[in-house]
Image (spheres, grey):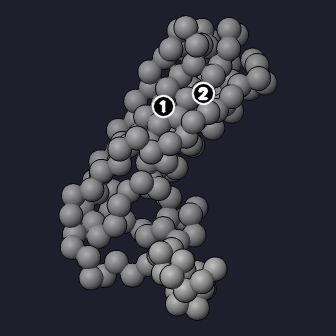
Amino acid sequence: MNQDEQHQLTHLDQDGRLRMVDVGDKAVTQREATAQTTIYLGPKGFPLLLAKELKKGDALAAARVAAILAVKNTYQLIPLCHNIPITGIEVDFTPDDRRQALEIRVTVRTQAQTGVEMEALTGAAVAALTIYDMCKAVDRGLVIDQLRLVH
């Protein structure tokens, strides 16, 4: 990697070593990010999830709490993330009867010197993993797909 390419990667210093980006000179601004993922549950798990009849309990409630905890702890999971003040978290679930799937959206807000994209992505991923964990006894063919930043 040449020096021009290294300078485009903000987490590398001039010698190519990993570093946490210094955001100290940036202004504190309102920031928001939304991430989304989908978990495909199939004909066994999907109706049980919606009816809250899983043996492990209410998976949606557990996934909501898991997403919130994941957002608040992203800096402990992703090595170069800053610990930033979170001012708001929204976790939304949209069932898709046709695909027997659940869409998960996590929106995170802050007033800080850096964004909350990683927090939103981490929240959506951990919510999906929680649904997976609570439904895997019913069907091991669950698929988590298309984790992405949408805003």
Upstream in the sequence, badge 2 or badge 1? 2
Q: Secondary structure at mark 2?
A: strand
The location of residue 88, given as percent across then percent down, is 29, 48
State whether residue 100 is above or below residue 1.
above
Image quadrant of residue 132? top right
Tell me the residue at 48%/17% (across/down): 95
Viewer-proximal residue among 150 and 131: 150
| 72 versus 130 height, above or below | below
Up the image or down, 79 lies above or below 134; here it is: below
Asked if residue 55 can be seen in this view, the reply is yes
Residue 87's spot in the image, x, y percent?
A: 28, 53
Residue 104 numbered tag: 1
Please give the residue where the numbered disc 2 appears in the rendered image.
39
Q: CA distance from mark 2 to mark 1?
A: 8 Å
Q: Is 108 positioned to the left or the right of 76 in the image? A: left
Residue 24: quarter of image: bottom left
Q: Residue furthest bottom?
A: 15
Label 1: which secondary element: strand
Q: Residue placed at 54% from the left, 77% from the top?
A: 5
Other residues around mark 2 within 10 Å, as few (<14) / some (14–19) / many (≥20):
many
